[in-house]
Amino acid sequence: MFKFLLILFLSISLSVSSQDNTNSLSNSSWTRTQSKMMDGSRDLSQESYRPLVWKFNGNKLCENIDSWFLAVNKCNNIKVENSFIKMSGKTVYQIEKLTADSLVVVENWEMKTSPDKIKRMRFVNTAILMKDFVKNEKSDSIVITARDIIPALKKDLISDITSILMKKGLNHDVTLDGQIFIFPKAQKVEVITDNKKLSKNNQATIDVFKTTLQENFKAWNLMGFERFEKIIIPYRFHSKQDEGTASISFSGRIPLKETKLFIPVIKNKFTSLENFSKGYKAVENQKFDNAVHFFNQAFEYDNTNTDALYNVVSTSLSQNKTDVACVALKKLNELEQAEGMKLYKEKCSGK
């Protein structure tokens, strides 16, 4: 049976224990620590790798998608009842677990039928996360921040940097790696850049970036970090002139260049879906080689379209073309898709 012909009915029994109380969500903050699908597959959405903090305030839930910038919030009206978090629109989360220090929610599980399409997110109480992080630091002098535990900016300095670069007409096609040093007691900021890959043509841009950060010590919220003499924040700053945009990201204790992340490559989602539809029709007409071609094209134009790969597997195995199926299964295995990983081990061992 082909994956797109299957209707998988998922029965999920989710309940909050009698000790849990949804009232404890009021005026609380939660930092996401994991995002996976119900079957354990990797969440391939781009959003899953971004920092995310949920802040509950009465009947509102604000999502902070940049833990380093306090003002980047998207707020929604919500209603919490019977272990459900109902947001404006059709978004619904069911609370799977709620304790003083952890929150686990399942997204829109009633709307979908397959466990590899249902997202499960784990959160930790932000205050407890911060407390434990600081407690585990043996030194009072130097601390290297984690990706989700960093001093936050009260002011959008990145927009200020972009504005200055544009006003001065500077070439700001640049990517900078380095570290931000914050000295709470001395009330000073220093910015270090890795100059190995930088061009002299970008020096003016680099100077604007460094100066703007270094002259704005008071823009940082250092709550929780007061005891340290020096705070080290590894960063990557990326600026694109033709788009007039700039962004900054933080890698925490692991350098960004060593961090292995899945990068969605969606060349053309419409073309991907169009090829997927052509593959479906080819299967109906029993033109299986054509179907495999179209499904592979669907994945080529959108590497989050794992259903296309599963259909390559199903179609190829129905023709006893294990070698073709294993090419697709290898991709699913690399994408950490639970069903694909299992089939890869069963069908492609030794290949």
Image (cartoon, rainbow, N blue to C red):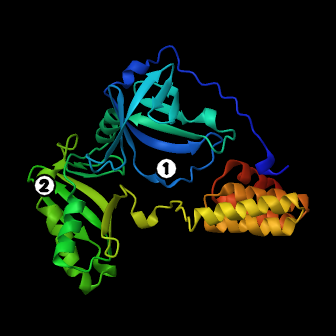
Task: Check disc 1: other Cα within 10 Å, few if <14, some if 14-19, many if 20+.
Answer: some
Residue 194 location (% of width, % of height): 29, 74
Which image quarter is the C terminus in? bottom right
Using the rendered view, name the quadrant where residue 197 is placed: bottom left
Closer-to-camera residue (289/193): 289
Disc 1 is placed on an element classified as helix
57 over 5 or under it: above or below? above
* Residue 48, numbered circle: 1
| Residue type beneath disc 1 | Ser
Residue 3 placement (x, y as % from top left): 78, 50
Left or right, 326 with respect to 113, comes to right
> Which mark lies nearer to you, 2 or 1?
1
Crowding at mark 2 (Cα within 10 Å: few <14, some 14-19, many 20+): some
**Depth check: 3 or 349 in front?**
3
Of all residues shown, which one is farthest toward the top? 18
Residue pointed to by mark 2: 217
| Amino acid type, mark 2 | Phe
Query: Is 223 drawn above or below residue 162 in the view shown?
Result: above
Which image quadrant is residue 278 in? bottom right
- Looking at the image, tell me whether mark 2 or mark 1 is earlier in sequence order: 1
- The answer to whether residue 63 is left or right of residue 200 is right
What's the residue at 43%, 17% (across, down)?
21
Helix, strand or loop status at disc 2: helix
Are the residues at dot 2 and dot 1 in contact (C-beta closer than 8 Å)? no
Q: CA distance from mark 2 to mark 1?
A: 31 Å
